[in-house]
Amino acid sequence: MGSSWLVCPRPRPDAALRVVCVPYAGGGASAFWDWADLLGDGVELWCAVLPGRERRFAEPAATEPAEIAAPLAEAIREEIRGPFVLFGHSMGGLIAFDVARRLGDGVRHLFVSATCAPHLGLRDEPHLLDDDGLLDWMTLLGGVPADLLAHKEMLGLLLPTLRADLTVCARYRGMSDVIDVPITAFAATGDPLATEAEVAAWQRYTTAGFDLVVRPGGHFYLKDDPAVVTRALAVTAGEGVQ
């Protein structure tokens, strides 16, 4: 169920809440596939499907923020019924914020995870590294599965999408819009890409309340215990659903 930009792995028409998840750089909708069970029967999961990966692999990955946020916001407006919240990890947090900015008060809550506030930009400009440097950078973050490292040809196909995604991240620098949507930001104590202070800086981007949740782990802390995040999504967002 879904369009080219959205997929709903387990439709729950009677759900009280919808959660729309946006993936990290180089990632896809499948990163959140298991969350449908973790969120429970009262929540319907939707995942953003971005060009350049999974079923849209043949399409070139976008390098401009508006090429993603504008059509994704339109797809959400057309397909999502009832109360919904947005969640984004790393690059996904920036895109989710941009979508929330475009949709306004239609969004009940924005959750950003392991994402520096937009004005801080992307440290070290990894999108400008050569392929070997980019792969080393992503491996240090823990974002490359061990079995994938052995498949150089596959990695060669995936790196252009990763580079394009990181270019999108870099181009969010300087965005200063403020939204009237509550923001909950997740930070990890050992994250070299988004420190606790850099994630806490999201507070300046909302007039509707802010909460910071700090967890142990690195940049991909949520892979170790996704239930920590999904519980917060269901409970925190559910408080605003009547």
Image (spheres, helix red, strand yellow):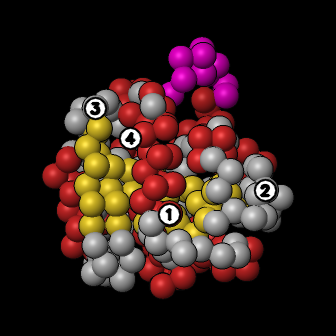
Q: Which circle, 2 or 4, is nearer the viewer? A: 2
> Residue 129 appears at what percent x and percent y?
38, 41
Q: Earlier in the sequence, mark 3 or mark 4?
A: 4
Residue span colored magenta: 143-154
Q: Which residue is mark 1?
A: 238
Q: Is residue 151 magenta?
A: yes
Q: Which circle, 3 or 1, is nearer the viewer? A: 1
Which amino acid, by three-letter code, is at mark 2? Pro
Which residue is painted at 46% across and 72% down in the image? Answer: 240
Q: Which mark is residue 216?
A: 3
Q: Earlier in the sequence, mark 2 or mark 4?
A: 2
Which residue is painted at 76% across and 58% down in the image? Answer: 12
Q: Which residue is mark 4?
A: 129
Q: CA distance from mark 3 to mark 2?
A: 32 Å
Which amino acid, by three-letter code, is at mark 4? Leu
> Residue 21 appears at what percent x and percent y?
57, 56
Please identify the quarter of the rendering in which residue 60 is found.
Answer: bottom right
Please identify the quarter of the rendering in which residue 149 is found.
Answer: top right
Where is the C terminus found, in terms of image quarters? bottom right
Q: CA distance from mark 2 to mark 1?
A: 18 Å
Which amino acid, by three-letter code, is at mark 1? Gly
**Residue 6 to residue 158: above or below:** below
Q: Earlier in the sequence, mark 3 or mark 1?
A: 3
Q: Earlier in the sequence, mark 4 or mark 1?
A: 4
Please identify the quarter of the rendering in which residue 142 is found.
Answer: top left
Q: Earlier in the sequence, mark 2 or mark 1?
A: 2
Q: Which residue is mark 2?
A: 11
> Residue 175 appears at what percent x and percent y?
32, 75
